[in-house]
């Protein structure tokens, strides 16, 4: 059984995403919506990590390095300016997409295991991650014209 592998992936992905949201929020504090929403989304990711804890206890957790490599490759720290904001949001989107598909895979495992508690946690957290992706996509669309066209 490889549920522990995906629990490890998701645990690290959510923790890295929380850290990245905080960094972006602080770096772009002049953008009030980014500052406040990024802080809320970081807290949401922290809650996702907490919700995984009973399942890590139940099924164990492996420590694959993919989320750390993704975080290091995509997010070497927040950038500045309009283009920097757009790039930071883009990186957050990619990291959140990684978490989203990992939630999906864990949901499939929950169905196979007939673990209703895990299925409920996946449903709640996967929905919140989908909302994060929606906000990131919308905010990138708002930032793109200014960042890409106006000098």
Image (cartoon, grey):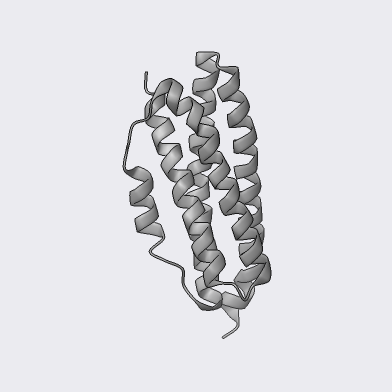
Name the residue at 35% across, 49% down. 68
Which of the 4 image quadrants contains residue 142? bottom right
Residue for point 48% across, 36% down: 102
**Number of dots carrying numbers:** 0
Residue 137 horizontal/vertical position (percent): 62, 56
Where's residue 94, x and y in %? 49, 52
63 relative to 137 in the view: left or right: left
Front-lying residue, 8 or 100: 8
Name the one closer to the observer, 150 or 18: 18
Q: Looking at the image, which residue sits at the far bottom?
A: 151
125 versus 119 height, above or below = below
Whether residue 144 is situated above or below residue 53 in the rendered picture: below
Direction from residue 78 to residue 32 in the image, left or right: right
Is residue 122 placed above or below 67 in the rendered structure?
above
Percent position of residue 34, x then y: 63, 65
Q: Position of residue 143 (x, y in %)?
A: 62, 70
Q: Hey, which quadrant is residue 40 in on the image?
A: bottom right
Q: Quadrant of the N terminus?
A: top left
Relative depth, front residue between 13 and 93 = 13
Residue 138 visible, this orientation: yes
Report if residue 141 is visible in the image: no
Please give left or right for residue 81 compared with residue 33 in the image: left
| Residue name at image x 45 percent, y 21 percent | 58
Quarter of the image with the C terminus in it: bottom right
The residue depicted at 38 percent of the width and 46 percent of the height is: 67
């Amino acid at each position: 059984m490889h549920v522990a592998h995906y629990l490890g992936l998701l645990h690290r992905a959510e923790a890295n995403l929380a850290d990245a949201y905080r960094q972006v929020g602080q770096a772009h504090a002049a953008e009030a919506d980014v500052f406040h929403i990024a802080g809320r989304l970081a807290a949401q990711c922290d809650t996702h990590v907490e919700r995984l804890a009973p399942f890590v206890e139940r099924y164990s957790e492996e420590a694959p390095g993919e989320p750390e490599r993704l975080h290091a490759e995509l997010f070497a720290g927040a950038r500045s300016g309009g283009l920097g904001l757009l790039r930071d949001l883009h990186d957050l989107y990619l990291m959140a997409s990684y978490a989203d598909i990992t939630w999906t895979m864990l949901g499939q495992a929950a169905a196979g295991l007939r673990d209703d508690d895990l299925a409920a946690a996946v449903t709640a957290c996967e929905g919140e991650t989908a909302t994060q992706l929606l906000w990131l996509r919308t905010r990138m669309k708002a930032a793109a014209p200014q960042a890409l066209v106006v000098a």
